[in-house]
């Protein structure tokens, strides 16, 4: 048997959760190794693609604060790596009055700036938008776009610079518990570590079940459409919340491309070994039809549609918690990317026992099997 290499921490998965965690652990002087099965940012992983929405507009104080931390941490990462990651053009939120009021009050309570915008103001902020009669939305400046590909490259570079060892395209096949220290097995490689982080995105269940952790995680595949709209790259991001049974719609500008728009809902079941997700032309048609109703000034020309997986939890909150020597950092719930480097600090704090957020705990009621029906997405 190959002798085990010894580390303080082994991180399984190099998506945004895993890379950010490896970066933070290395910064805390833990001898850290990360293994990623497909390679960070591979097209069938959750953290792939050019861009993600970023906003502090949440109706849960926990996520507002995490987003505020993330904005600072992304800026620090930009300075450290010389990469442009944030494209902040603000965000407009639309939808049911009660939802908007809750967002408004929560953001303000956390010291964030957000304000109501009537139809005239909405049209001024985004001339392409067609407000409904008497519509009142919200606007905040701390929103827009994270250039996801740049963010991933920056996280990987900073993690390596801080001393983390990154093994790309190496698949962990087993986690052996029972001895004094866990052993992570990846082909012939055996890694003995004090702590193991499972950040394997939609594949997390395959690693969790053999070590006796059964969670109602629901991976599915969601589609996004990039509009050929280069003149719109200065426009704010947009979120229309819970407007139909299909969920809401969100969008943001993408420098060099135009504007990205998508339904806030997974559309197809996920299968673990699919190597390519081709897009659904019917869904592309539906999103272009939404655009014609709601953003009629935006060119309804699709440049590219893509599908990627995300992993829902029943309450749309992440899972970050400890079970023995294992720390879980999974259940991205379709909205984790924006938090980028702040996720790493969160996972490291939970690992070290400095934090134990009730929203993210393993023993919260929503994760008990009898409550596993997926809730409407209201993130
Ligand atoms: C279409 C879409 C739109 C989204 N829009 C937004 C948005 O606008 N704003 C936002 O904040 N978030 C958004 N998200 C969510 C965000 O992208 C995810 O929350 C985030 O990328 C999840 O990252 P992860 O690290 O958990 O998973 P992943 O990126 O999937 O990373 C998991 C990694 O684990 C590796 N792995 C799996 N099994 C093993 C194994 N056995 N051994 C080693 N490695 C393994 C995989 O190769 C993979 O790289 C969106 C997601 C999708 C799909």
Image: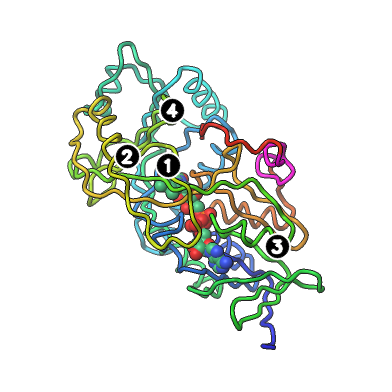
Which quarter of the rendered picture does the N terminus lie within? Answer: bottom right
Mark 3 sits on what residue?
210
SS of the residue under disc 2: helix
Residue for point 57% across, 27% down: 109
| Relative depth, front residue between 354 and 308 | 308
Left or right: where does residue 65 sit relative to residue 134?
right
Q: Which one is in front in this view, the residue at disc 1 or the one at disc 4?
A: 1
Rendered location of residue 242, percent (x, y): 45, 26
Q: CA distance from mark 2 to mark 3?
A: 37 Å
Residues tagged 1 and 4 counted as in contact (Cβ below 8 A): no
Residue range in magenta is: 358-369
SS of the residue under disc 3: helix
Residues tagged 1 and 2 counted as in contact (Cβ below 8 A): yes
- Farthest top residue in view: 134
Residue 299 occupies quadrant: top left
Q: CA distance from mark 1 to mark 2?
A: 9 Å
Residues tagged 2 and 3 counted as in contact (Cβ below 8 A): no
Rendered position, 140 above or below 310? above
Q: Which one is in front in this view, the residue at disc 4 or the one at disc 3?
A: 3
Mark 1 sits on what residue?
267
């Amino acid at each position: 048997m190959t002798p085990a290499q010894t580390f303080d921490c082994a991180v399984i998965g190099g998506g945004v959760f895993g890379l950010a965690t490896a970066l933070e652990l290395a910064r805390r002087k833990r001898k850290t190794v990360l293994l990623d099965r497909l390679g960070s940012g591979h097209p069938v992983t959750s953290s792939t693609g050019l861009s993600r929405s970023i906003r502090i507009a949440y109706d849960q104080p926990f996520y507002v604060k995490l987003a505020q931390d993330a904005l600072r941490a992304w800026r620090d990462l930009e300075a450290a790596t010389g990469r442009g990651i944030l494209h902040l053009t603000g965000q407009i939120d639309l939808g049911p009055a009660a939802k908007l009021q809750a967002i408004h009050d929560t953001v303000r309570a956390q010291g964030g700036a957000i304000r109501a915008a009537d139809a005239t103001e909405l049209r001024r902020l985004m001339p392409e938008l067609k407000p409904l009669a008497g519509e009142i939305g919200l606007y905040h400046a701390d929103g827009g776009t994270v250039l996801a590909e740049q963010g991933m490259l920056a996280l990987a570079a900073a993690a390596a610079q801080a001393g983390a060892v990154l093994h790309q395209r190496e698949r962990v096949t087993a986690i052996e518990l029972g001895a004094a220290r866990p052993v992570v097995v990846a082909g012939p490689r055996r890694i003995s570590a004090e702590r193991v982080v499972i950040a394997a995105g939609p594949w997390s269940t395959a690693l969790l079940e053999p070590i006796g952790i059964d969670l109602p995680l629901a991976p599915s595949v969601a589609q996004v459409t990039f509009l050929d709209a280069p003149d719109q790259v200065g426009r704010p991001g947009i979120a229309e919340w819970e407007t139909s049974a299909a969920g809401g719609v969100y969008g943001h500008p993408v420098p060099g491309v135009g504007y990205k728009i998508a339904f806030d809902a997974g559309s197809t079941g996920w299968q673990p070994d699919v190597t390519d997700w081709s897009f659904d032309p019917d869904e592309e048609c539906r999103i272009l039809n939404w655009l014609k109703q709601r953003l009629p000034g935006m060119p309804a020309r699709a440049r590219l549609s893509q599908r990627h997986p995300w992993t829902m939890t029943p309450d749309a909150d992440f899972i970050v918690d400890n079970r023995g020597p294992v720390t879980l950092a999974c259940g991205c719930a379709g909205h984790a990317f924006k938090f980028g480097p702040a996720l790493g600090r969160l996972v490291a704090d939970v690992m070290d026992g400095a934090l134990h957020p009730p929203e993210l705990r393993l023993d919260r009621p929503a994760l008990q099997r009898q409550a596993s029906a997926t809730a409407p997405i209201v993130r």
